[in-house]
Image (spheres, rainbow, N blue to C red):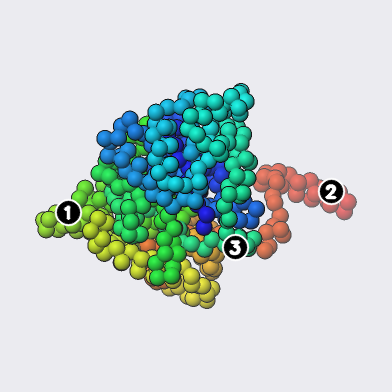
Amino acid sequence: MSNVAIVGRPNVGKSSLFNKLTKSKKAIVSEFEGLTRDRQVSKTIIDNLSYEIIDSGGLNFSNNKSTLDSQILNQTNLATDEADLVLFVVDYKSGLLPDDQEISKLLRKKNKDICLVINKVDGVSDETAKLDFMKLGYQQVICTSVSHNYGIDSIIEFIAHKLDGIPVEPSEINDNFKIAILGKPNAGKSTLINSLIGSDRLIASNLPGTTIDSIEIEFELNSDKYILVDTAGIRRKGKVTSKEEKFALLKSLESAKNANFILLIIDSSVGITSQDQALISECLKSFKPLLLLFNKWDLLNQYEKERFNSDLEQFNLNFGFIDNIKISAEKKTNLSKIFKNIKEIREHLSKEYKTSILNKLLEDALINHPPSISKGIRPKLKFMSFVSKSPLSFKIHGNHLEGLAPSYKKYLDNYFRKALSLQSIPLRMIFEASDNPYAYKAKRVSTGLVTRRKIKNQLRKKLSSKN
């Protein structure tokens, strides 16, 4: 795969360029700097050839003592080491700054093919825009205004000219199993991914909110291909103030909806909070398989473990159908159990459910606990059918289904999940009223009783007068 790395200072337009080249909105774009921290990787197709584009965090040398900035620098170094071509992005409006010169020195040491991209060139000629940056000495220079789509085609043509992409078949389908990893800030999401893939691919820090963007990482285990999605930590809505954090929150929830599977990490040293339970309920709305990971289990002493297990019993009264594993992402404890569980759930999701089996279970469920009478009528559940695998959906047909109480629907949900061994798999139960085949024959009465009597009396008078 031919790799293209996008490098530069914060807020010069790297993420905007990444989104344009990959035709996506994976990277968060904002006027505030420093939102991109980890390497964001995605593929782009040019003339039926595939290229890999890598977005990197903004390099800030004026604050090189910051732990986070040093980690971003490390991630950028890894991005440029992987790259066959580097797009060095600068900001025309800001002019040539000392940090640009420092980045240029860093890149020249890499001995890579470099193209200088002068962004935010609005209202001036390319030759005028290039003047201030001639000191850097680059021969390959492209002027752009990414926000106005100016110069994007030139970059695409340059990439195609410089690199040999991998041919892509029109029918090629990405069958990688996508796993979204969610949780509160500092629960250990990035640490878990680093431990799973065996490298420091993501910045992991004790500071909450280190991850802002959602990062997708391809991962292979025992010939099974996965995409791990690291998401921003989800805080209470009342504590989310900046629009960038609000957007990151929406992207985290969107990642859950677009994933095949959700891993929700809970910090066991803090315990299961009401926010964790609200997040679980939010994940269940996406109808995706869900596995709970109680992280940092190694930090608990024996008393704390017993207290946690006691709280877990109470928690299971509402969420007992969701599997959970106690892990230590940092020490890589019990991580193998995660993919064993995922594999079992994938096997369940691949099954076909025969109508005859479903209707036998429905009959048993009705005998065990029939629905209550509502407004003088007992709802009648006639038959059941299989609808889809993703989300796993069943449809129940019958009459007067509007009278089914929510508690009875929950009973059916739990009954079928237990009968079909669907642990950790949310069910979508669809209730559909059966059509009345004789409805068209029913005569609609448009008059009242008194009016009908008058009509009958008038008719009798006519008949008697004729006689």
Q: Are marks 2 and 3 in contact (CB under 8 Å)?
A: no
Give the residue number, with chain letter if any, for mark 1. 299
Image coordinates for residue 41, horizontal then vertical, percent: 46, 50
Number of the front mark, 1 or 3: 3
Mark 1, other Cα within 10 Å: few <14 / some 14–19 / many ≥20 = few
Name the quadrant containing residue 186.
top left
Image coordinates for residue 130, horizontal then vertical, percent: 56, 28
**Which type of secondary structure does the marked residue at label 1 adopt?**
helix
Instruction: Compare marks 2 and 1 and give the one earlier in the sequence.
Output: 1
**Which type of secondary structure does the marked residue at label 3 adopt?**
loop
Instruction: Compare marks 1 and 3 and give the one earlier in the sequence.
Output: 3
Q: Amino acid at mark 2?
A: Lys
Name the quadrant containing residue 439.
bottom right
Give the residue number, with chain letter if any, for mark 2. 462
Q: Is residue 149 visible?
A: no
Q: Which mark is residue 406?
A: none
